[in-house]
Amino acid sequence: KKENTSEDGKFRVFDHPNHNDFQHQDFQRDGLNDRESAIMDLASINAATDNFSETNLLGQGGFGPVYK
């Protein structure tokens, strides 16, 4: 399994020790599959943030910078 590595270029959005069954149930209730909706490739993230442009930087969150 190569999640969260730069080798495969994909990141799990909710792959964190505090991710719990309640969050998973929220995805299921909303008709979402967290596997399908929470994995994004780096190219998509770069495109969405304009390559992490400072003009898209909203601030600093608990886990790092937050971009729009």
Image: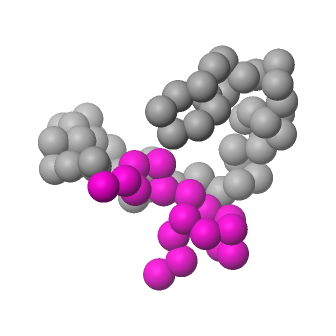
Q: Toward the viewer: 45 or 29?
A: 45
The scheme the figure's colours follow is one colour
Q: Residue at x 66, y 18 (%)?
A: 58
| Residue 23 visible (yes or no) | yes
Q: Is residue 5 magenta?
A: yes
Residues rendered magenta in the picture: 1-17
Q: Is residue 66 above or below residue 46?
A: above
Q: Is residue 19 above or below residue 59?
A: below
Q: Position of residue 3 (x, y in %)?
A: 51, 70
| Residue 68 visible (yes or no) | no
Q: Residue at x 82, y 25 (%)?
A: 54
Classify residue 21 as left or right of residue 56. Answer: left
Q: Position of residue 20 (x, y in %)?
A: 20, 49
Q: Is residue 55 above or below residue 41?
A: above
Q: Main secondary structure of the magenta part?
A: loop
Classify residue 4 as left or right of residue 26. Answer: right
Q: Residue at x 56, y 58 (%)?
A: 11
Q: Position of residue 12 (x, y in %)?
A: 48, 56
Q: Toward the viewer: 41 or 53?
A: 53
Can you name the residue that lies furthest to the bottom here?
A: 1
